[in-house]
Image: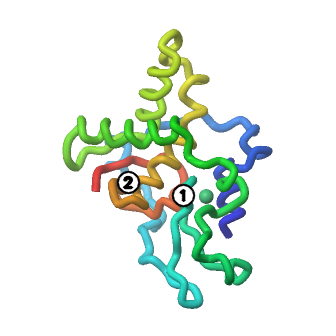
Amino acid sequence: MHDSLTVMHGFVGRQADRPRPPHRCLHVSAQASNQSVPDRRPKPQSVTAGHPDKTCATCGRTITWRRKWERDWDNIRFCSDACRTHKPSPQDLELEQTILALLAGRGRDKTICPSEAARAVARAQTPSAPEAPETWQPLMEPARAAARRLVAAGRIVITQGGRIVDPSTAKGPIRLRLR
Ligand SMILES: [Zn+2]
């Protein structure tokens, strides 16, 4: 299940080359619409064969115990080969810090779009073309992964339509809020 999720989110190299649809922010005003939102509320941590779920140290998604990991489950930190070879970089950590700083600046119970963190980090890296999409769009999936890691660390929650959702399965535009 995790391999398919990983591929769907474009973390695997050959999939990441596909053009992505342009990013759409799910702004607060859009949340007021009465379109139905699928139930992606976080599930309680599940336990498989006596082994509680873990969180991938790279992408922040849930890792469910599998029999092939019977011997080295204690050492498993990544959900896939892609995540094992792409450990969080200084830029990934900067995205985490930027998300927390933006949320702290906005105030309690306010939300941000992960693209705001992507743009802020891109602005700092490329002051010559601060708003060019090619500078910040590549940071979108890293920004979402940073948000998932912050959820795992208990710092923030991810919401859609004002409701807290499961970071592992949330698809489409998300908002971030301090926990
Ligand atoms: Zn992962």
The residue that label 2 is drawn on is 161
Report if the beta carbon of the residue with label 1 is closer than 8 angstroms to ligand 1. Answer: yes
Q: Nearer the viewer, residue 109 or 46?
A: 46
For marks 2 and 1, give the one nearer the viewer. 1
Task: Please say if 69 is above or below 60.
Answer: below
Q: Amino acid at mark 1?
A: Ala
Residue ranking furthest to the right: 14
Which residue of the protein is positioned furthest toward the top in this rendering? 128
Give me the residue at 52% from left, 75% from top: 53
- Toward the viewer: 47 or 41? 47
Residue at label 1?
Answer: 57
State the separation of the CA atoms marked 2 and 1.
Answer: 27 Å
Q: Residue furthest left?
A: 108
Residue 105: percent from left, percent from top? 24, 35
Residue at the (52%, 17%) spot, across then down: 126
| Crowding at mark 2 (Cα within 10 Å: few <14, some 14-19, many 20+) | many
19, 39: nearer the viewer: 19
Q: Is residue 58 left or right of residue 39?
A: right
Amino acid of disc 2: Gly
> x%, y% of residue 25?
45, 38
The count of marks equals 2
Give the residue at x 45% y 77%: 45
Q: Residues within 10 Å of mark 1 (few under 14, many from 20)?
A: many
Q: Quadrant of the C terminus?
A: bottom left
The residue lying at 64 percent from left, 63 percent from top is 79
Q: Please indicate, yes or no, whether residue 34 appears anywhere in the rendered image.
A: no
* Residue 134: image location, x then y, percent: 61, 23
- Choose between 104 and 109: the one closer to the eye: 104
